[in-house]
Amino acid sequence: MPETNARIGFIGLGNMGARMARCIVDAGRDVLGFDPRPGAVSEAGASPAAGAAAVVAGSDVVLLSLPDSRVVESVVHDDEAFLAAVRPGQVVVDLSTASPESTRRIAADLAERGATYLDAGISGGAAAAEKGALTLMVGGDAEALERVRPVLDLFSASIHRCGASGAGHTVKLLNNFLNAIALSATSEVMVAAKKADLDLATVLDVLNASSGVNFATLNRFPKIITGDYLKGGLTNTLMLKDVTLYLELLADLGVTSLHASGPTASFGLARALGYADQISNTVVDAIGDVSGGIRLHDQREDA
């Protein structure tokens, strides 16, 4: 049965985690939270816990939003206090972008303790997280998903069960790779359009009414050409990490990747040029830097 009164814990209250936790709190639910960054828990509206293990001990549903599999494993798989606090019937939901292989190992370990581990990749970015309109791609036990659905519904608009453990993170990596392709390729096109002295709003109108339309042309670049980079989303470092995880997945599956070089080079360039911790939309500035110092928006126009 759905756990409508479950105690909710949240570990990892960064850009995305804080927004999801805030949606839960704004819906009138208490959240027990932990993040190593000072002030992160209170900013999200959660009640502070002494550590990750304390969140597990005080919660029925534990949500994780962490940077990568290495961090997830250090918190869940390698922390004896965390594992000791896990109890039968508990559900841990990993909202991170992580390796499906790592996810399956953690799920098996928690299953030995009677708990269930769901991998739930998210899509929609910071804007959707703030509105509680994320898309979730979930892998793992169907019954456990139904139990925690009332919690997940507080920050998502659509939830898709993709299959067994690891399937949610697999679909997430596939989606993020297409996102990386769209953003890096559209950045290149828009820099070329600027250098060709074209009106960028008109170019976007054409693309969005033509076969080149994609998420970046529809949702990112109409803002970027006005100087709004939509700060708060995935950084260039994290985007490159996701592309690398995608390549590892394809290697495990025995599938050849013919298109990974573009986003790998683009977001690698952005990191090398000093945009590592800035939102991935700034990849267009990195490409502009090596194309003659091109910027889509002239800040002097706003002066």
Image (cartoon, grey):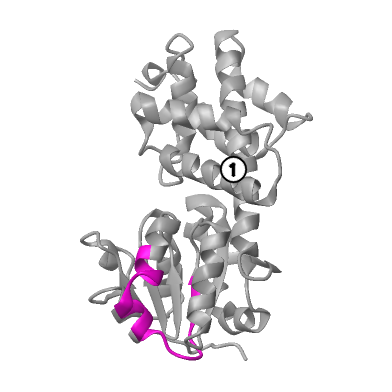
Residue 167 x %, y %: 65, 63
Which residue occupies 40% across, 70% down?
77
Q: Is residue 245 above or below residue 30?
A: above
Question: Relative to the observer, which residue lies in front, 44 or 95?
Answer: 95
In which quadrant is the N terminus drawn? bottom right
Residue 84, magenta (yes or no): yes
Q: Is residue 115 above or below residue 200?
A: below
Label 1 SS: helix
Q: Is residue 209 visible?
A: yes
Determine whether, in the image, residue 164 is placed left or right of residue 247: right
Q: Which image quadrant is residue 18 in?
A: bottom left
Which residue occupies 32% across, 72% down?
79
Q: What segment carries the magenta color? A: 74-93
Which residue occupies 50% across, 85% down?
112
Determine whether, in the image, residue 213 is placed left or right of residue 61: right
Which residue occupies 71% across, 27% down?
207
Residue 250, magenta (yes or no): no
Q: Amino acid at mark 1?
A: Leu
Q: Residues within 10 Å of mark 1 (few under 14, many from 20)?
A: some
Residue located beneath label 1 in the image = 247
Q: Is residue 44 above or below residue 212?
A: below
